[in-house]
Image (cartoon, rainbow, N blue to C red):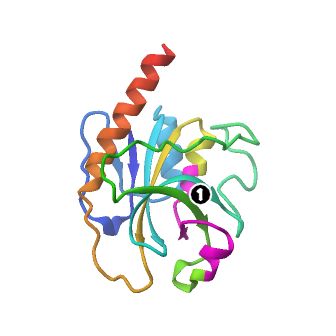
Amino acid sequence: MYIVIPRDWGDVVSSRDGIFVCEEYSVESIRKGLENGEKTFLIGADALSNSGGWLLVRDHLALFGTGSLAGPNHPSGPRFPNLRGMYIVPRVQDRSVRSGIVMKVPDTRFSTGAELKAFSCDALVSSGIDLAVAAAHGGAGVVFVLNCRTPADRSRADFSFLNTLIQETEEVRSSELQRNH
């Protein structure tokens, strides 16, 4: 599993057998992982939401700006990939973790609750979706986890949840591989 999380999340997850934590938060880092044969990516991002906590993304809206597939096609995947079903949403026992739809906006610092309401999404992000799309373009599965904060929330999240999420994702991918072989 290839993990790409924001630097300010700290050292919450460390590399170990089968898991590589990348310190570069970029589409290029995703493509390097694909070139090395990675098939599962866990991508983290900070988000703005009407309720705080953790959100596992099950779909996204990307209506603003250009995406990671704009321009000449990258050889890691087809010109027009099918992005339906690109997200893996592991069943996590923690009831405070929810799943939902995220929308990409230019900058969450200038976003309002009206955007959340108008587009019927659960959270807004300004990063992460391009990375997830690049991974899916290369045929990989993506767990996209958001650290959601409300506009008034300034507290630091409890990142211990990420280790549970990694374990659940490994179990899901392992059972999928066994079914396919």
Which segment did they paint magenta?
Answer: 114-132
Q: Where residue 145 sits: x, y (%)?
A: 43, 56
| Residue with the most extreme top position | 181
Residue drawn 39% across and 58% down? Answer: 5
Magenta stretch: includes residue 55: no
The residue at the point 23 percent across, 57 percent down is 160
Q: Quadrant of the N terminus?
A: top left
Residue extending farthest to the front is 95
- Residue at the (28%, 55%) spot, across then down: 161
Q: Quadrant of residue 146?
A: bottom left
Which is more toward the observer, 26 or 171? 171
Residue at position x 41%, y 42% from top? 90
- SS of the residue at dot 1? helix
Horizontal relation, residue 79 to residue 112: left or right: right
Q: How many C-alpha atoms fall within 10 Å of the one at disc 1: few (<14), some, or many (≥20)?
A: some
Residue 110 position (above or below residue 178) = below
Looking at the image, which is closer to me, 73 or 155?
155
- In the rendered structure, the answer to whether residue 93 lies left or right of residue 49 reads left
The picture places residue 47, in percent across and down from the top left corner, at 47, 70
24 or 4: nearer the viewer: 4
Residue 74 sits in quarter: top right
Provide the residue designation for mark 1.
130
